[in-house]
Image (tube, rainbow, N blue to C red):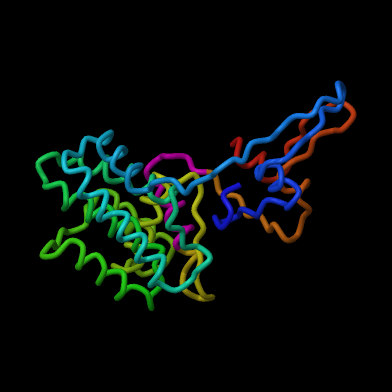
Amino acid sequence: MNPGYAGRTELPENLKALFRGGKLRLKYCNLPVVLQPCAMVVPDFELICEIMLVAEGFIEARLLARKFITLYQLCKELLSKQDHYDWGLRAIKSVLVVAGSLKRGDPDRPEDQVLMRSLRDFNIPKIVTDDMPVFMGLIGDLFPALDVPRKRDLGFESFVKQAVLELKLQPEDNFVLKVVQLEELLAVRHSVFVVGNAGTGKSQVLKSLNKTYHNMKRRPVWTDLNPKAVTNDELFGIINPATREWKDENEASSTRK
């Protein structure tokens, strides 16, 4: 289902035919059953966004939802096509969760500033360098004359700088920002992919965040896995066909820890 969405495939033609109407005979009683056509529509993203904004405590939900969905539609049309870009409902929900937490943390701040901050700070980490001017231009057009500073946790940043120094690295502002952005994404996502060219510091960002968690006594678990070196069964696990017993393998064992 969900054709056109990331990771989804089109329905086969024989299954599509069942939704266009026709006759089907039941296997055991040999009775004909008439199948009525089934219509499927694209969900109303703006309405869904408005409802979720209301649930998060926003008063001007209708106007903000229109701006939110307009931004994502323009990003989908104007930005380059990247495998890690996601402008669908899943990404919308994640940003709305961030917006709700920001509003509860700063209830006196105007709602348009709260939403603009969440849209900017949550999406910037995944925007490639060439697309950044276009994205920031869209943000400026939809939220004119708004320049809201990003929310900073100075205590956490001090832990990051300490961890970076312990790893014999230089705690430059851009590098510390990448570590902080990774931590913010992990707070609202079940999993995060760090992508980029060779030599851009992907591994060091991960190691710095891991070291930061150790210094903060959070007890993180670090496991290196090469998915190309093992089969799917060895990576995720397998069910014994005779006993129906599940056996954990590399990924499942690491996740349980």
Q: Which residues are magenta?
A: 205-220
> Whole-percent x and y of residue 166?
40, 59
What residue do we see at 28% from left, 42% from top?
50
The residue at the far right in this view is: 242
In the image, is 7 to the left or to the right of 12? left
Q: Main secondary structure of the magenta part?
A: helix
The one nearer the camera, 213 or 48, is 48
Q: Where does residue 253 sit, x and y in percent of width and height?
A: 67, 39
Residue displayed at 86% across by 25% down:
30
**The C terminus is located in which quarter?**
top right
| Residue displayed at 20% across by 67% down | 140
Outermost residue toward the bottom? 130
Q: Residue at x 31, y 74 (%)?
A: 134
Q: Nearer the viewer, residue 248 or 159?
A: 248
Percent coordinates x, y for residue 80 in the rendering: 44, 74
Q: How many marks?
A: 0
Q: Is residue 219 magenta?
A: yes
Q: Residue lying at the far top in this picture: please name it.
A: 29
Q: Is 83 on the left-hand or right-hand side of 114?
A: right
Q: Does the image show residue 73?
A: yes
Left or right, 15 with reference to 103: right
Up/down of 10 relative to 107, above or below:
below
Is residue 50 toward the left or the right of residue 79 in the image? Answer: left
Point out residue 175 in the picture as x, y percentages from the top left corner.
36, 67
Above or below: residue 56 compared with residue 128: above
| Magenta residue check for 129 | no
Say if residue 214 shows up in the picture.
Answer: no
